[in-house]
Image (cartoon, rainbow, N blue to C red):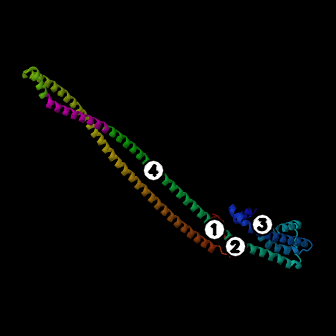
Amino acid sequence: MTDRKLRSREGTALPSSHTAKLEPWSHGLFASCAAGGRLIAFFSQVFLDVGSSHPSSRVQAGYASPRSQAPHSAFGRGPSCGLSHCQRRQGPDQPPRSEPQELGPLNGDTTTTVRLCTSEEAGQHPKAIARLLQQHEEDKKKWALQVEKERELELGEKLDEQRRVLEKEHEEALQVLRASYEQEKEALTHSFQEAKAALQETIDGLTAQLEAFQAKMKRVEESILSRDYKKHIQEYGSPSQFWEQELESLHFVIEMKNERIHDLDKRLILTETVKEKNLLLEEKITALQHENEDLHARGHNQMVVSRQLSEDLLLAREALEKEIQLRRQLQQEKEELLYRVLGADASPAFPLASVTPTEVSFLAT
């Protein structure tokens, strides 16, 4: 009901929150005006009843009715209904009757009551509007601060989440690189140790065999000639057969040595092959060491990049905080200027009719 009356008076609809704020003082104002209207209607009915017996009362009632109709036309109460009833009772052809002169002071009191009600209504409306504007500005400031805090918290959470995601991805990539590097290093080290052990065993065996063969050849060279020569002389007494047998034995020894040399050549070729493989493995180890150094450098670069990103994140957060503070200061200055402008415009002396529907809708937003 209050909302419909405000719409009919101001030509526009206020929001439900503003109408709820208008209800406490509007109920009292409407109740006082309604009481005044009922009082005026009562006195008008009395005037009409008296005027039915006194012809002069019609003139005074007709003179007093425009005063009483103007302030209460917005509320639908007043003596207009009583006057229309009186006019219907009189008829269109009857001349107007004047009221008694004794009811003149009563009509003056009624007019004074209507004027007081109107002045009270005109004085209370600007104060109520000023209170509503002040409360609206306070609510607007509170909501703006709350929205800024929520935005700041949301942006901080997003930045923290992005930083955590980047750190997690960096750690996962670094762990994968470290694991692959460790696996390759262990595999290459194991294969190198196995090849080195096999080659060392082969070299040790060949060295032992060579030393044994050299010792044996030395013993043969020292003892075979003198022993066989003495024995042959004792048996045959002639050195010719001895030399023939000695030549045969020498041929046999030479053949054995040739076979031994062929075996050594084969082993030497095998050793050279193993040595080449060892060199290839060493080259691979060197290449892997270079790759390891590159991976370490890459990991260091990634750490530097992550630190730079963290610093950029902190700088962005500081810039965001400064911007939020600046926006907050600008919003406060804007609200202070708006409050000053509205406070300068909303003086208690101006009537309610000077507030246009456009201004009311602007203040409501």
Magenta stretch, main secondary structure class:
helix
Sequence order check, earlier mark of 2 and 4: 2
| Earlier residue among tags 4 and 3 | 3
Quadrant in the picture for the N terminus = bottom right
| Mark nearer the N terminus (3 vs 1) | 3
Q: Can you name the residue that lies furthest to the right here?
A: 53
Q: Which residue is mark 2?
A: 127
Front tag of 1 and 2: 1
Residue 105 location, x and y as percent?
A: 85, 79
Give whichever of 45, 212 is nearer the camera.
Answer: 212
Amino acid on which the number 1 mark rests in the picture: Glu
Residue under the point 33% across and 44% down: 288
How many labels were placed on the picture? Answer: 4
Proximity of marks 1 and 2: CB atoms separated by less than 8 Å: no
Circle 3 SS class:
loop
Q: Secondary structure at mark 2?
A: helix
Residue carrying label 3? 75
CA distance for labels 1 and 4: 49 Å
Determine which residue is flagged by label 1: 138
Tag 4 residue = 171
Q: Which residues are magenta?
A: 196-224
Q: Secondary structure at mark 1?
A: helix
Q: Nearer the viewer, residue 305 or 16?
A: 305
Residue type at tag 2: Lys
User: Where 207 falls versus 339 (above or below)?
Assistant: above
In the picture, measured across the screen, residue 89 lies left or right of residue 25, that is right
The alpha-carbon separation of the residues under discs 2 and 3 comes to 21 Å
